[in-house]
Image (spheres, grey):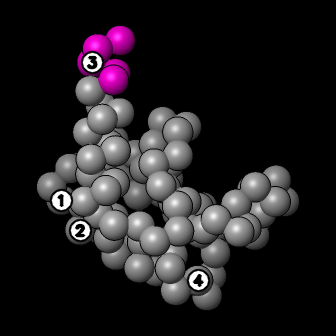
Amino acid sequence: MRVKMYSRAGCPLCDEAFEELNLLKQSMNIEIEVVDIYKDDALLEQYQLMIPVVEYDGKMLGYGKIKKDFIRKRLLDKIQETIVE
């Protein structure tokens, strides 16, 4: 399962979010793709006031202060939705 984290260099909240996602990496078998919003004007406009933003399957799971337990719950909810569909 691949999770995207929209970020930028020099963002302390982004660094914290990456650490939280790394804690989930082993238990949930996720891959983390870090996307620098400064490399795409559309992403910069969309996320500059929200980063870090964590996304799975095109849906936002959380932004700002990211906590692993919250993201774990959101991922499990998304997986459950996929099973039900």
Q: Earlier in the sequence, mark 1 or mark 3?
A: 1
Q: Earlier in the sequence, mark 2 or mark 3?
A: 2
Q: Secondary structure at mark 4?
A: loop
Q: Position of residue 6 (x, y in %)?
A: 58, 61
Quadrant for residue 56, please give it.
top left
Which residue type does callout 2 highlight?
Leu
Between marks 4 and 1 in the image, the one whose residue lies nearer the viewer: 4
- Depth check, front residue: 56 or 84: 84
Q: Are marks 4 and 1 in contact (CB under 8 Å)?
A: no
Q: Residue 52 vs residue 20: left or right?
A: right
The rendered magenta stretch, by its main secondary structure, is classed as helix
Identify the residue position indicated by label 4 in the image: 11
Identify the residue position indicated by label 1 in the image: 26
Which residue type does callout 3 highlight?
Ile
Q: Position of residue 50 (x, y in %)?
A: 64, 65
Identify the residue position indicated by label 3 in the image: 83
Q: Which mark is residue 23?
A: 2
Q: Earlier in the sequence, mark 3 or mark 4?
A: 4
Q: Secondary structure at mark 3?
A: helix
Q: Report, in whole angstroms, how far the alpha carbon at label 1 lies from the one at label 2.
A: 7 Å
Q: Secondary structure at mark 1?
A: helix
Q: Position of residue 79 (x, y in %)?
A: 29, 31
Which residue type does callout 1 highlight?
Gln
Stretch in magenta: 81-85
Q: Are marks 1 and 2 in contact (CB under 8 Å)?
A: yes
